[in-house]
Image (cartoon, grey):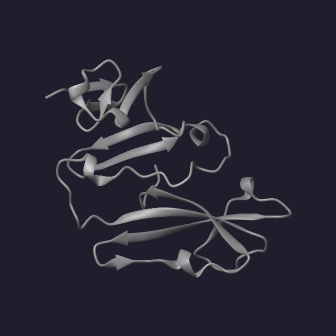
Amino acid sequence: MCSSSCGDVRNISYPFRLKGDPARCGHPELELSCENNKTILELSNSARYYVKRISHDKCTISVADVNLANGSCGLPYKSFSLYPYFFRHINDYILKSYAHYVNCSSNIVDQAYTKVPCLSNNQSNVYVYVGHVGYGVTNARISDLPDSCVFISKIATSDTME
């Protein structure tokens, strides 16, 4: 079995591989690069993420959008998700969270939605709502959007921010 490391990210192994590792070590769409001792995941849509941690036991990867991590305020790339079939052992009972971004022409008066000030202006208000989806669990408030709002993107996330 192949295993590599970059900076604080250890045990980079299937389904991931580090650039320069043999092709058999990981899925080609999950090839990571090492830049200035930081592990980078670059997706086919040119989205770039710092890899913070990979947990093969929990089938999770913790990432941070490179632009946001560097202090830029921009929308995350549309609907980013790594599909669970990349992992060898799948836990159907894992509760997943998604950050839903919406753009509204008027203010939302609902505590579940958090305004993103750096993305909002006089004509539009960008909000984020974190919803949960898991085995037997659905929290689909996003489907109840007011008429003044449109869906922008959905990003897989965790309940805790680091």
Position of residue 78 measured from the top left corner of the image (x, y, whole percent): 56, 52
Position of residue 151 measured from the top left corner of the image (x, y, whole percent): 62, 66
The residue at the far left in this view is: 1
Looking at the image, which residue is at 49% across and 43% down?
A: 64
Q: Is residue 123 left or right of residue 40?
A: right
Q: Is residue 64 left or right of residue 25?
A: right
Looking at the image, which residue is at 23% across and 36% down?
A: 14
Q: Is residue 44 left or right of residue 82?
A: right
Q: Say above or below: 87 vs 24.
A: below
Is the N terminus in the top left, top right, bottom left or bottom right quadrant?
A: top left
Q: Depth check: give the residue in front, 21 or 73.
A: 21
Q: Depth check: give the residue in front, 54 or 144.
A: 144
Q: How many marks?
A: 0
Q: Say above or below: 159 vs 86.
A: below
Position of residue 123 measured from the top left corner of the image (x, y, whole percent): 84, 64
Looking at the image, which residue is at 27% across and 20% down?
A: 21
Q: Which image quadrant for residue 136? A: bottom left
